Image (cartoon, rainbow, N blue to C red):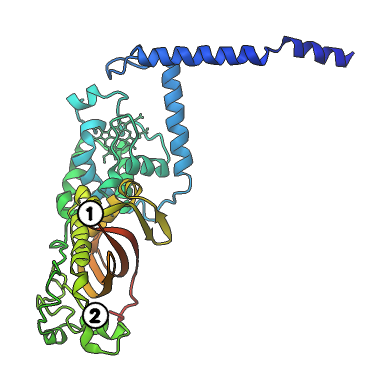
Amino acid sequence: MTDSRRLDVRQHLPSAAFAGFLLVIICGIGAAVIYGGLYNIGADAPHLRPTYWLIASLRDRSISVRAQDISVPKDLDDPKRVTTGAGLYGEMCSSCHLAPGMEKSELSQGLYPQAPELARADRRPPVQQFWIIKHGIKLTAMPAWGRTHNDDLIWDLVAFIRTLPQLTPAQYQAAVKSAPADHDEMMRNMPGMQMNDSRGSEESGEKSDAGHSHDTTQDGAASKGGDTDEHSYARVGSQTHSHDDSADGTSTAGTPLPASTAEPRAVVDTFFRALAANDAAGASRLLDPAVLIYESGAAERSREEYASHHMGSDAAFLKTAKHRLLSRTGDAVGDIAWVASESQLSGTQRNKPFLMVSTETMVLRKSANGWRIVHIHWSSRTPKSGAY
Ligand code: HEC
């Protein structure tokens, strides 16, 4: 009895041929809709309900899955974060997301999807807000701010938008006004991060003794280098006769570099200069399309991948940091070269001074267009106090 029933059911299922036929029809209709331009992509024509549902579900699942492993900084409620975030918000977000007491802007009215009024909606958990602000949302006007702002600043924004719904127009105005300086200034609070063009300087044989008369930092670096020949590091800091507050890195240190490395070294320096100037195109140009980048245990395997991931945050960070080259070594044979550099990065982030030592190795290959970076490995550490 049961057997025959099961058979019955089978007989009612569509045959494979029929299912295939149906699939072809559906794909055909889909293709006709696309090719025939039947879907109105204009921002002034709302999506059909099912389309809206589909897109919203795709967006929300994508965001919640991607945001789930992010951890919220413990000091998210720190008033300092909130004030910094207020300044950023007033400058970069209110034109679309509005703010307490603010009339709808021409920009905000034309958006589709609309930018939610963040002062009204506090709909998402902080990790999702962080993810959205950092990565943006495709096919909406929401930009990826992570290209140009480091994570810390993005958390400042999250901290601020969480307070927005409680602010009166007057409080909002006051918050924006009390924000530290202008944000460009904030991000660039260093005199500038410049790397000397090292081309030719090593070969010029400038005397290096001046380096010793400088602060202990430099001497510390020298002895730490592990090179028995102190003089090979003696040039650190010598060239610009700089003090610690000089923005200017010194061009070189370390064992004498073969002249054949002059060009690859110049490429390395130009790459960093471009990054620090947020010149993504200029930096990318010096990378081989298949460049492999190792950074703090993570790998990025192409120029494209780097450009869409870490480049923005690296640039934002470098922009705030003062860079000083402590030592450099390398070699070039035929069309392969390597350049290894130890540098010190210092600056202030969120009003706290920081000091870091970074090591970086680059491998370059000479192509028809000149030297291009094919591999980068960099890492950094915070020296124990007194080490530098
Ligand atoms: C050019 C317009 C525009 C600007 C500028 C902009 N956003 Fe957005 N933002 C949008 C749009 C549009 C959405 C909605 C996207 C969607 O619904 O899929 C959005 C979504 C968001 C969301 C998700 C809101 C929610 O609860 O769903 C957050 C958070 C957010 N933006 C924060 C910011 C912050 C912070 C800034 C400033 C740093 C900013 N946005 C600048 C257009 C903008």
Q: Are marks 1 and 2 in contact (CB under 8 Å)?
A: no
Secondary structure under tag 2 reads loop
Question: At label 2, which amino acid type do we have?
Answer: Gly
Q: Kindly indicate the quadrant of the structure image that contains residue 89.
A: top left
Viewed as shown, does residue 17 lie left or right of 383? right
Residue 103 against residue 364 in the figure, above or below:
above
Measured Cα–Cα span from mark 1 to mark 2: 30 Å
Q: Quadrant of the C terminus?
A: bottom left
Can residue 320 be seen in the rendering of this structure? no
Residue 123's label in the rendered image is none
Residue 321 against residue 344 in the figure, above or below:
above
For the residue pair 20 and 328, the one nearer the viewer reads as 20
In this figure, which residue is indicated by the disc labeled 2? 254
Secondary structure under tag 1 reads loop
Residue at 42% over, 26% down: 56
For the residue carrying disc 1, how many other residues have a C-alpha within 10 Å: few (<14), some (14-19), or many (20+)? Answer: few
**Where does residue 71 sit, x and y in percent of width and height?**
44, 51
Can residue 185 be seen in the rendering of this structure? yes
Outermost right residue: 1
**Where does residue 95 sit, x and y in percent of width and height?**
20, 32
Viewed as shown, does residue 382 lie left or right of 274? right
Residue depth check, mark 1 versus mark 2: number of the one nearer the observer: 1
**Where does residue 166 sit, x and y in percent of width and height?**
31, 37
For the residue pair 162 and 27, the one nearer the viewer reads as 27
**Where does residue 210 sit, x and y in percent of width and height?**
11, 85
For the residue carrying disc 2, how many other residues have a C-alpha within 10 Å: few (<14), some (14-19), or many (20+)? Answer: many
Residue 368's label in the rendered image is 1
Q: Kindly indicate the quadrant of the structure image that contains residue 270.
A: bottom left
Question: At label 1, which amino acid type do we have?
Answer: Ala
